Amino acid sequence: MSKKEIKSVEYGLEKIFEGAQDFLPLLGTDYVEFYVGNAKQAAHFYKTAFGFQSYAYRGLETGSRDQVSYVLKQDKIRLVLTTPLNSKSPINDHIVKHGDGVKVVALWVEDARSAYEETTKRGAKSYMEPTVEKDEHGEVVRAGIYTYGETVHMFVERKNYKGKFMPGFVEWKSDYNPEPTGLKFIDHMVGNVGWNEMNTWVKWYEDVMGFVNFLSFDDKQIHTEYSALMSKVMSNGNGRIKFPINEPAEGKKKSQIEEYLDFYEGPGVQHIAVATDDIIKTVSDLRSRGVEFLSTPPEEYYASVPGRLEEFSHELREDIEKLKSLGIMIDADEEGYLLQIFTKPVEDRPTLFFEIIQRMGAKGFGAGNFKALFQSIEREQALRGTL
């Protein structure tokens, strides 16, 4: 990151902690729900490849006649994989249009009714009015609003619930639970929106959710010879929830954002960044389980790393040769450095992918890696014939 970008981060964080509105206090990410064509098989993939554990289940055996859901857990991350059980379910429409993808980004709140009331009166479109779900373990209150595309933010209040996940689910017991891969929590989630829509959604998050735009990148910073994009990072008041929003920018060829919009057929969640405390071990485990990552940056990229760290008086604690052998990238700011790597798309459509990130004090999002990252993505696009 440049000095100017760092000042932008510092100013943005100052605004967050001193001036952000507090009408929507968020405690963290509660769960992320995917609509998928076959939840049973998708659950097996996330267990085998990413090290998630069986957690909870809802289906025919629990009285759910129209859909089935498998809940997977790893540390503080919960994924819900949902599939329709008949052709009449509206979930089918989402899968036909978008393929497997993120439908719900659920946010943990103290008061779901208040969260719904505060956001809808500020202009949010309702997805689900406050609903109380009960069983012998207590009650969960949920309410939802639409964000970009068909994506939903669900507010989840679970302070009066002692059960496994929520009413309607039972514990999912399985003899097959591969070892975790060290994934800890969701660091941030990135959304792709259409041409000239980024600022519209930035304003939506500011006005409706009380978020702050604390970091921005334009097409002069995020570009290669062939493509470009623009991005603004939104954060809630306590900094626990961060949603970068991307839009395409003009370039010689089709950008990764355009490719996503073409194949997802609209705006949606582009990638989920998950944190680890030991990225070398995590990525080594993931690679051994078949997770595919973008191609390794060139030799000159790693040759420049010591100088970039030295600019901020940081010393790399990890073995750079190990990082290079795994394709892990390094970026720095005044607070520290970060290590990150990106998977290839995890479905046949070139849409959703994952980022593995380890923060060693850095607050940014790897601006110094953008060019190398996008060149790797462009190499994949060229193979797909979509560049």
Image: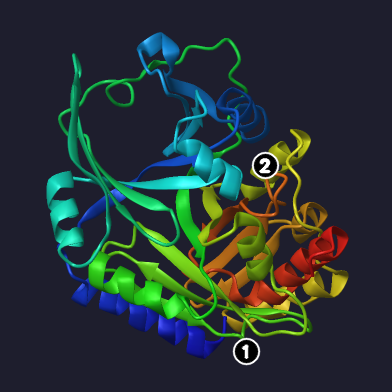
Q: Quadrant of residue 142?
A: top left
One can see residue 295 in this view: yes
Q: Residue at x 35, y 20 (%)?
A: 169
- The reply to whether residue 317 is visible in this rendering is no
Mark 2 sits on what residue?
A: 281
Quadrant in which residue 178 is drawn: top right
Secondary element type, mark 1: loop
Relative to residue 344, is residue 339 drawn left or right?
left
Q: Identify the residue at horizontal 45%, vertical 15% (top origin).
A: 172
- Callout 2, which amino acid? Lys
Q: Which residue is mark 1?
A: 220
Where does the image place residue 343, in percent across and percent down from the top left?
A: 69, 51
Query: Tag 2's secondary structure?
Result: helix
Q: How is the image coloured?
A: rainbow
Q: Amino acid at mark 1?
A: Lys
Counting from the top left corner in percent of width and height, residue 318 is at 68, 56
Please name the residue shown 50% across and 68% down the image.
Answer: 362
Q: Is residue 365 above or below residue 108?
A: below
Q: Nearer the viewer, residue 353 or 51?
A: 353
